Amino acid sequence: MAGHSKFKNIMHRKGRADKQRSKLFSKLSRDITVAAKSGMPDPAMNPRLRLAVNNAKAESLPKEVIQRAINKASSGDVDTMEEIRYEGRGPGGVGIIVEALTDNRNRAASNIGAAFKKNGGALGEMNSVAFMWDRVGQIIYSAEAGTEDAVMEAAIEAGAQDVESDLVKPDIYEDAPGHTIWTAFEDLNDVAEAISKILGDPKSTAIVWKPQSDVPVTGEAVGTLMKLLDALDAEDDVQNVYSNEDISDEDAAKYAG
């Protein structure tokens, strides 16, 4: 295991949290409903639902909204929802994976395809990008959770695979993760429970796509890429957007919207 200090994800750039707050609440509610539909409506008996509820609590989603989202799983509305993955390329050859949850496959495909086309990207075939990524567990703690060494020690004890810590750059990023702990796909729940006994509750816990390598992007292509990622993330049907760009702090600050 090796500790790293390289925060590069522009999806956390300054100002993003406030603009996306209402969408985040909707996304968290949908996550809970779909998770409850996939198994038991009890978080103690349904690991996926437990993760969704914990993430919602970490973002201060009201308790009544969480319960309403769980109850909605028993309604017929959820039966029409599909989880779909889209893959494509952005400016500079950046790989992009989009996870959607929709009740209208044609609408989702049309809107997501249009977002790619209008912002210098191109939608690709299934697995045109995903083969260069790994499906892993991700646990995020704020910088206040502890020092790099303390978090690394806790992660090792809990059985995690790796840790990335980024504890600075508040002038550019206001929602930087602080500590990102990586686990094997199948170990996420066990590691999350073990490490929470040491560091407390995390900011978020999720199964995510992690790129095996990054694509350097510089200059104006950075601004175009940010517009593409923003356009994708703004779509109501989109739940998550992953990209493998490597952008300097200077360009991230210059082209941040």
Image: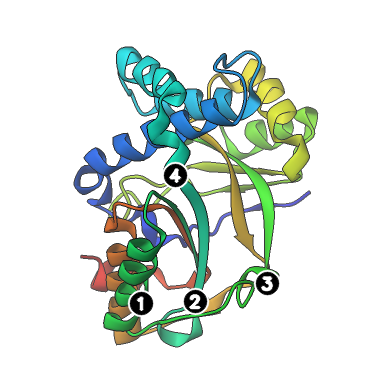
2 or 1: tag closer to the N-terminus = 2
Q: Amino acid at mark 4?
A: Met
Q: How many marks?
A: 4
Q: Amino acid at mark 3?
A: Met
Distance of label 1 from label 3 (alpha carbons): 20 Å
The label number, if any, that marks residue 132 in the structure image: 3
User: Which residue occupies 27% across, 43% down?
Assistant: 23
2 or 4: tag closer to the N-terminus = 4
**Residue 133's spot in the image, x, y percent?**
66, 65
- For label 4, the residue is 81
4 or 1: tag closer to the N-terminus = 4
Distance of label 3 from label 4 (alpha carbons): 28 Å
Assess disc 1: are there few (<14), some (14-19) or many (≥20) residues with their C-alpha within 10 Å of its C-alpha: many
- For label 2, the residue is 88
Say whether residue 71 is left or right of residue 23: right
Assess disc 3: are there few (<14), some (14-19) or many (≥20) residues with their C-alpha within 10 Å of its C-alpha: some
Quadrant position of the C terminus in the picture:
bottom left
Say whether residue 196 is left or right of residue 219: right
**Residue 45's spot in the image, x, y percent?**
66, 15
Mark 3 vs mark 4, foreground winner is: 4
Mark 2 and mark 1 residues within 8 Å of each other at the beta carbon: yes
- For label 1, the residue is 116
**Residue 207's spot in the image, x, y percent?**
61, 44
**Quadrant in which residue 209 is drawn:** bottom right
